[in-house]
Image: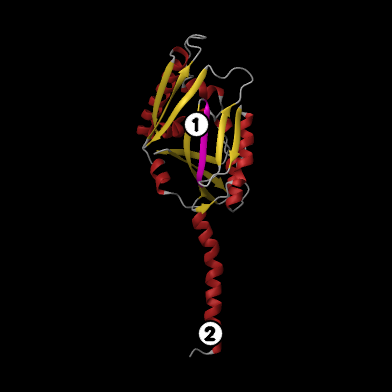
Amino acid sequence: MPKPRSRWVVIGLAVLCLLVSAPVGVWVALTHQPDFYRRAVTIPHAQTETEAKHFVEQSIQLSNDIINEPKWEAVFTDHEVNAWLAEDLLKSFADLVPANVHDPRVIFDMDRITAAFQVDRGSFTSVVWLVARVRVPEGNVLELTIEKMRVGALPLPIEQVLERVTRQARDRGLDVQWREDPDGPVATIRYASKGRNDDVVLERLNILEGKIVFSGRSNGVGAGGPKRLPNRRVLQSRFPRRNRQVQPEESGPESVLRSAISPAS
């Protein structure tokens, strides 16, 4: 039978281990990188450069088809989208991305999109990621069911982001309405236009393994003549490169999320 003094020593050591391991466990959970994300950010530059160029070429073709054809369809792989995100996003649209957010990536799976990005915060970096089921219930209406949201390995309360995301979406001409569903919060997104918005109609969107397929119709075929998307050089001349700023040290899932969704300063 252990002596009383020995028993208190054991209890004290257990409490000390708990006090030390708890913050370490939180830190490990916050800095955890999912396997899918690690794979997506380690593609060689030569491969991403080629696939980013292909993504831009397909986008130009899609733009022309929407203007000149009554029916249009496009297919993009997640490799092509991620290549463009790696090569061109922060070069071309620096003012649209918060200063402490980098390396966004997407994964396409059956009926689902997984989106992730890194957030620098003080002395550590976290991966914020979510899984959403996507469908088009009617023309020009997109429905997203948020099934999972994480910062590292920790669950992130979805309610913390709904209001801010909704406000930013509406500022960009989107009508966003939320409702509760047994599988998670559902966002119904409609394009809100002051004038007509039925000239271009998104009719179908399918998420397959490794690719996204969407199609629709154009009612005002030929209006305005053929157009072209700006190339990389033009885009980079319009949007300055981002100057990274040192962020004040802050910890915890809520502070990481606030940094991820706050506008760049």
Mark nearer the N terminus (1 vs 2): 2
In the picture of the structure, the residue carrying the numbered disc 1 is 137
Quarter of the view holding residue 4 = bottom right
Secondary structure of the residue carrying numbered label 1:
strand
In the picture of the structure, the residue carrying the numbered disc 2 is 7
Quarter of the view holding residue 215 = top left
Q: Determine crowd level at label 2: few under 14, some 14-19, many 20+ residues with C-alpha closer than 10 A.
A: few
In this view of the protein, can residue 81 be seen by the observer? yes
Quarter of the view holding residue 179 = top right
Secondary structure of the residue carrying numbered label 2:
helix
Q: Which residues are magenta?
A: 140-148
Question: Which residue sits at x=42%, y=19%?
Answer: 72
Pointers 1 and 2 in contact (C-beta within 8 Å): no
The verdict on residue 132 being magenta is no
144 shown above or below 236: below
Quarter of the image with the C terminus in it = top right
The verdict on residue 146 being magenta is yes
Our reading of the magenta stretch's main secondary structure is strand
The number of numbered discs placed on residues in the rendered structure image is: 2
Residue 232: mark: none
Q: Three-letter amino acid code at disc 2?
A: Arg
Question: Which residue sits at x=56%, y=37%?
Answer: 187
Q: Three-letter amino acid code at disc 1?
A: Pro
Residue 64 placement (x, y as % from top left) = 44, 15
In this view of the protein, can residue 258 be seen by the observer? no
